[in-house]
């Protein structure tokens, strides 16, 4: 496997936050140099706020308020850089831990909470303009890549890409992990994407662990190389460098949108937390490994870079306060959600009323009625 320290990796910021582009990053530097202070500060703000939300949600699950929570701790730079690279007309297909991707595009964080609490079958309406063309979370590994390829094929058939109008041409970006990359769905999606030259970017977050299976067991070469078999260019980027993630994704999306066909990105990052709150990572990885990756923390890296550019304590304090307020608001609104109605399981099973579903609903109502009057 190619080392994360390999100079062939596209990186702009070193682990200590210094501006130190690798040779492979040189061609992307104009995109980074075009960013202003406000853009850079937004990247940092996004990462800090979503980490506060992520920690709050993890605590809520531990306190019995959520059924499950998939932490995004450590993967903030890969997600923030990529979502900020997308344009307003682009379509995003997340997996299930892209919390900042969704909220940045307009999804209310409480809609993610409602999903993980078991109060909704989907979470939000993907067709509502306020959700920024963001599709629903997909917990079936790799399935979203098929959805994304099908949607991107539709864009190509409808002539919504490759017209030369950067303000209206559309593209798709789909997120998945190293574990999902071993699923047949991903390879089938790449076959169709390559065959139909879809306006699409496959964004693989290699966080090194498919639950308890290390990426070294899944692949004997960088995962980005798999894209070559389907005829699509690929990039391997330091996923803990938000600037590199932004620049590479912006270039890839622009090319896909222009009609040049699909692109693939492997963002090399690390899942600093558990796979989900039902997982115990101490059973399969060492504290030394975790400490090593903690030294490459994406937020600390960007903070050091901004500090070197002259960012003040007032700015960092303001971001921390915003993040805390955001997390506190999520906790408050979560506690106001109330109980999950059991009848929810019968809603939206079919597009129209179905007699078997109604029969099951009536049976449950009758069963529950047998307990009326009993003492708790």
Image (cartoon, rainbow, N blue to C red):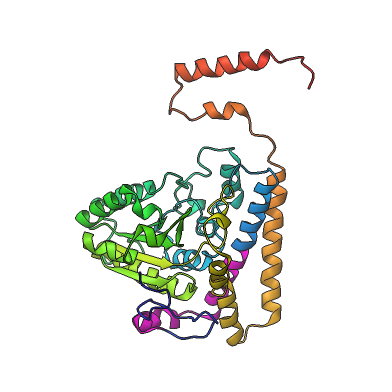
Q: Please indicate whether residue 372 sits to the left or right of residue 227 in the image.
A: right
Q: Is residue 274 visible?
A: no
Residue 319 picture quarter: bottom right
Q: Quadrant of residue 120?
A: top right
Q: Nearer the viewer, residue 69 or 123?
A: 69
Q: Is residue 228 left or right of residue 13?
A: left
Percent across and percent down for residue 57 are: 64, 52
The answer, for residue 75, to whether it is visible in the render is yes
Q: Is residue 43 magenta?
A: yes
Residue ID at (48%, 74%): 241
Residue at the spot 37% in from the left edge and 79% down from the top edge: 28
Q: Is residue 26 magenta?
A: yes
- As displayed, is residue 220 above or below residue 305? above
Q: Is residue 172 above or below residue 20?
A: above
Q: Answer left or right for 322 relative to 247.
A: right
Position above or below: 289 against 154? below
Q: What x and y, as percent, mark residue 207?
A: 46, 62
Q: Quadrant of the N terminus?
A: bottom left
Which corner quadrant holds the C terminus? top right
| Total tally of numbered discs in the picture | 0
Q: Position of residue 177 (x, y in %)?
A: 42, 57
Please tell me which residue is depicted at 71% across the width and 67% down the height of the picture.
Answer: 321
Left or right, residue 166 beside residue 243: left
Q: Residue furthest right?
A: 375
**Toward which corner of the image does residue 301 lie, by quadrant?**
bottom right
Q: Main secondary structure of the magenta part?
A: helix
Q: Which residues are magenta?
A: 22-49
Residue 41 point in image, percent of width and height: 57, 75
């Amino acid at each position: 496997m190619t080392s994360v320290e390999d100079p062939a990796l596209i990186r702009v910021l070193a682990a200590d936050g210094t501006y130190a582009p690798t040779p492979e990053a040189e061609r992307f530097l104009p995109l980074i140099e075009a960013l202003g202070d406000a853009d850079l500060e937004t990247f940092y703000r996004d990462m800090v706020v979503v980490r506060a939300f992520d920690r709050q949600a993890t605590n809520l699950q531990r306190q019995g308020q959520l059924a499950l929570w998939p932490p995004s701790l450590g993967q903030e730079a890969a997600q923030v850089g990529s979502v900020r690279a997308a344009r307003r007309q682009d379509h995003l297909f997340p997996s299930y831990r892209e919390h900042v991707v969704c909220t940045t595009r307009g999804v209310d964080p409480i809609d993610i909470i409602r999903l993980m609490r078991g109060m909704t079958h989907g979470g939000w309406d993907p067709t509502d303009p306020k959700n920024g063309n963001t599709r629903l979370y997909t917990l079936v590994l790799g399935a979203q890549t098929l959805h994304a390829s099908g949607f991107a094929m539709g864009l190509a058939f409808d002539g919504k890409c490759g017209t030369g109008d950067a303000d209206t041409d559309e593209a798709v970006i789909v997120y998945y992990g190293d574990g999902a990359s071993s699923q047949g769905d991903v390879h089938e999606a790449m076959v169709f994407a390559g065959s139909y030259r879809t306006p699409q970017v496959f964004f693989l977050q290699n966080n090194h662990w498919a639950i308890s299976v290390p990426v070294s067991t899944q692949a004997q070469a960088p995962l980005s190389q798999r894209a070559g078999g389907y005829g699509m260019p690929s990039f391997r980027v330091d996923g803990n460098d938000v600037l590199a993630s932004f620049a590479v994704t912006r270039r890839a999306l622009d090319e896909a949108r222009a009609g040049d066909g699909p692109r693939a990105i492997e963002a090399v990052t690390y899942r600093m937390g558990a796979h989900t709150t039902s997982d115990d990572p101490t059973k399969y990885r060492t504290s030394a490994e975790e400490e090593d990756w903690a030294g490459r923390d994406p937020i600390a890296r960007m903070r050091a870079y901004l500090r070197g550019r002259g960012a003040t304590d007032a700015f960092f304090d303001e971001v921390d306060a915003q993040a805390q307020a955001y997390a506190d608001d999520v906790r408050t609104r979560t506690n106001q959600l109330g109980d999950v109605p059991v009848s929810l399981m019968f809603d939206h099973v079919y597009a129209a009323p179905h007699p078997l579903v109604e029969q099951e609903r009536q049976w449950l109502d009758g069963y529950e009625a047998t307990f009326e009057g009993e003492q708790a």
